[in-house]
Amino acid sequence: MPFLKNTWYVAASAGELDAPMVSRTICNQPIVLFRNSDGTPAAIHDRCPHRFVPLSMGKRVGDTIQCGYHGLAFDGTGACVDAPHDDDSQKARACIKGYAVAEKHKWIWIWMGEAADANPDLIPDFGFFDEEDTIACCQGYTHMKGNYQLISDNLLDLSHIHYLHPEVHQGSNFEDFTNKVKRDGDTVYSMLYRHHYHIDAAKRGMFGLGEGPEDVEGQGHSRWDVPGVLFVDTAFWDHGKTIDEGYRTPNAHLITPETETSSHYFWGSGRTYMLDVPQVTEMAAAVMKNVFETQDGPMIEAQQRDMGESTDFLNHKPIILKADAAGVMARRIMQQKIRAEAGETILQDAAE
């Protein structure tokens, strides 16, 4: 199945662009990202039109990337600004594709369609990364050898936690929770209410809840947006109190297809407790990375191996369980949007 072009994908964390440039394949397209001297991010096709070598094998020269083979230089729009061995007429012929890029919520977002159609207001809200006075955050990256929609499936069905990550929810049973799924436009909500959730005394202390009962209220609400960016808002609080009197760990799971069968998994986690303890931030990042790379990742990659080069999971006629409702809904939305975009392209091409 083709990729949706007219949407925002995460291309990198903001901190990654501290490097001179970052090379990354997105939706089968080689992209090189960098910051201009004024701090604005840029992204262009990572391929010199002269000898077809990656521009990322070259070097930064001011606000351009100079090809390491013959010295052609390109700015952040993809325009060739220097062709040292030819006259200026060659510059116009040597231009490459530039992409619309936006920096928001500590992430670098890229629009894979026509840059003129890109609207940063369409980027989903992950504003908790900006609430530095009340939420401490970590960010990370994991590469997965699986289709990006398989990762969304995993995140929208939290019933797997009790089997794949049994240490996370010890003392609680998924059957005791209430899961409600709804669609609002192109957004899917999977609301998980964890009534009578078990938190032992050690975890209460760690999470800043103080002394109290081990039986609490909890939630694990997920919001999925096209093309596969999820906000998961986990929280726990004592019965009779409000969520604001408990603790929250908002999480971001930002999935970007590399190829049909491999994905960039950008993730971030926040917390409302022990904000000034960097060791806790480091520990949280290490735990998340370990979980994704040693538990979720191997399962998703095993799915992809069994499916081979196929990426249409539903075409394999899987057994659909009640907990799959949100994932199936998200897949249907992606299918509709990809087909609509492909149809628009066909009609536009025919008209031209």
Image (cartoon, rainbow, N blue to C red):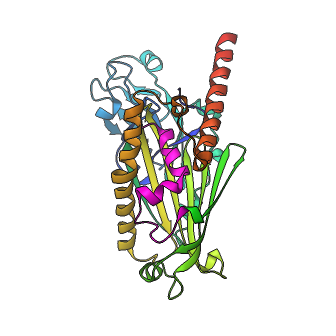
Extreme residue toward the bottom, this view? 211
Q: Quadrant of residue 67?
A: top left
Q: Quadrant of residue 186?
A: top right
| Foreground of the two, 74 or 176 | 176
Q: x, y percentage for residue 349?
A: 64, 14
- At 51% from the left edge and 51% from the top edge, which residue is drawn? 155
Q: x, y percentage for residue 350?
A: 67, 11
Q: Quadrant of residue 192?
A: bottom right
In this rendering, position of residue 28 left or right of residue 124: left
Q: x, y percentage for residue 312?
A: 52, 30
| Foreground of the two, 243 or 59 | 243
| Foreground of the two, 25 or 43 | 25
Q: x, y percentage for residue 48?
A: 37, 24
Reply yes or no: does residue 155 show up in magenta.
Answer: yes
Reply yes or no: does residue 261 show up in magenta.
Answer: no
Look at the image and tell me whether residue 318 can be seen.
yes
Image height check: is 147 above or below 80? below
| Foreground of the two, 69 or 328 | 328
- At 36% from the left edge and 63% from the top edge, which residue is drawn? 287
Q: How many marks?
A: 0
Extreme residue toward the right, this view? 185
- At 41% from the left edge and 55% from the top edge, which residue is drawn? 164
Look at the image and tell me whether residue 62 can be seen.
no
In this rendering, position of residue 283 left or right of residue 219: left
What span is in magenta? 145-174
Image quarter hosting the C terminus: top right
